Image (spheres, helix red, strand yellow):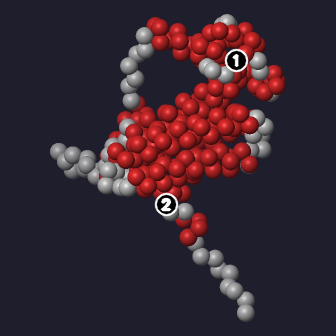
Amino acid sequence: MPLPCIPFPHTPRNCTACKFARSVERVRSSEIPAPSRRELNKSATRDAIVHAAFEQLNTGGFSSLTAESVAEAAGVSRRTLFNYFPSIEAALNEPTKQLLDRAVSALDGMDLDVDLLSAAVAAVESLVDPALLEPVATLYLHAAAHPQMTRMQLEAWNTCAEQLTQIVTVRAPQGTELAAMVFAHAIVGAGKAAFAQWSKHLTGPLDAHSTQLLRTTLAEAIAQLRDGFPSLQQRTDNTRKA
């Protein structure tokens, strides 16, 4: 990341690096209006359902999950559960949707003078809440054995790509629709590759360290796009033998 300039007295900090730094700080410290009591109650119920579903997933796997058992663990009725989520899989997929929505919102809040790829890296780096990343990581590790869950995760990533395409179109109106779509799907592809790489090399339990490693890998994956895949540009010293 470029270092912000050191301005002379009475000189506005308008260099690209300064705007970038201000954008990152604004995204990380943005104020959210206080929710109403009703919204808090609905959020608490939704969180209780998601938490109960993940607790059972961790202890018994997908085979242990039923609407009745999750509802009971969450302290709600079966009907209430389905008022919030159309299926248990949808409840499990909620953290993934929230993570991707937060990343999209962070990118949308970046200063327009910050280039798209640097803004995308900063948006991922703003995802510092382990409580948000950990369930997403947990579900990713379990989903490979559950086709419906894999499909729902794919739908969440595709929705993210559509949202990114809209943001890119606004931030770079001079670009073509194809360019915006390619950019958005490249970002999503980098994110999916980061999850795959992270899970491949995961050797210990899912904890604070491994969750932080996932966040770092996500940022590094998008930085590969920003920096033009530097490791692939290096020439080897090997010479072709005659």
Q: Residue at x 47, y 8 (%)?
A: 38
Check disc 2 and give the amino acid type. Answer: Asp
Q: Reply above or below: 59 against 200.
A: above
Residue 71: image tag: none
Q: Name the mark nearer the viewer: 1 or 2.
A: 1
Residue 205, image x and y in percent? Answer: 76, 36
Closer to the camera in the image, 129 or 104? 104
Q: Are marks 1 and 2 in contact (CB under 8 Å)?
A: no
Query: Which quarter of the rendering shows the C terminus?
Result: bottom right
Mark 1 neighbour density, 10 Å: few (under 14) some (14–19) many (20 or more) = many
Task: Report whether residue 147 is seen.
Answer: yes
Side (left or right) of 3 relative to 230: left
Side (left or right) of 179 relative to 140: left
Q: Residue at x 54, y 30 (%)?
A: 98
Residue, disc 2: 227
Check disc 1 and give the amino acid type. Answer: Ala
Closer to the camera in the image, 149 or 138? 149
Taking the view exactly as shown, the residue that stands out farthest to the left is: 10
Q: Residue at x 49, y 60 (%)?
A: 227
Residue 201, image x and y in percent? Answer: 74, 49
Residue 169, image x and y in percent? Answer: 37, 47
Residue, disc 1: 52
Closer to the camera in the image, 93 or 102? 93
Secondary structure under the numbered disc 1 in the rendered image: helix
Secondary structure under the numbered disc 2 in the rendered image: helix
Taking the view exactly as shown, the residue that stands out farthest to the bottom is: 242
